[in-house]
Image: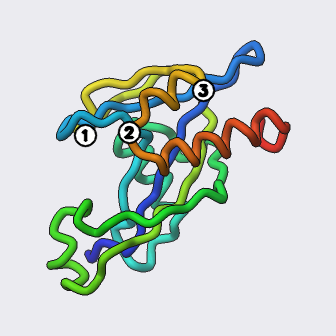
Amino acid sequence: MARAKYQVLIIPFHIANDKVSYCVFHRSDRDVWQFISGGGEEEDESIMFSAKRESYEEAKIDVNNKFFPLDSMCSIPTHCVKEASKIWGEDWLVIPEYSFAVKLDSLKIHLSDEHTEYTWVDYDTAVKMLTHDSNKTALWELNSKIKLGKIC
């Protein structure tokens, strides 16, 4: 099974009493706060399927929750992917990252070994905590769409 040439980013969110919370995760292998992320496991796996699979693997988020594709995209350097040069060759330098949001009814998350902790926070706190600009951009898009009533 070959690793697909893309990455997915998934933002779990929760709305209660008109208050929106976002779940951010602390990685176990480095001091980074981020949303759920990972890659496709097979070239023929759909990007949405990858987002649902990664959400389940990293946080036990049920695949039947409502997932929303976002417009935010970025490029990830392949050196961020373990053994990328062995998988795709030395000349493959970046892969696209596709962003999604998933609405959760519960604040309960079951962490995988990829993360040491998680926390539910408001938008401003999430922006301050997040390490990667791609996460901040996707969060801004999601937060804006929620405010505009495009996602609820």
* Sooner in the amino-acid sequence: mark 1 or mark 2: 1
Residue at image position (36%, 34%) is 33
Q: Is residue 31 above or below residue 86?
A: above
Neighbour tally class for label 3: few under 14, some 14-19, many 20 plus, Cα within 10 Å:
some
Q: Check disc 1 and give the amino acid type.
A: Glu
Q: Is residue 132 above or below residue 33?
A: below
Residue 94, how many percent across, how many down? 36, 73
The one nearer the camera, 115 or 108, is 115
Q: Is residue 152 left or right of residue 30?
A: right
Q: Which residue is mark 3?
A: 123
Q: What element does badge 1 sit on?
A: loop
Q: Could you tell me how far apart the alpha carbons at marks 3 and 1 are, in whole angstroms?
A: 23 Å
Please state which of the two labelled residues, at mark 3 or mark 1, is closer to the viewer.
Answer: 3
Q: Check disc 3 and give the amino acid type.
A: Tyr
Residue at image position (44%, 66%) is 75
Residue at image position (82%, 44%) is 150
Q: Which residue is mark 1?
A: 114
Q: Quadrant of residue 99?
A: bottom right
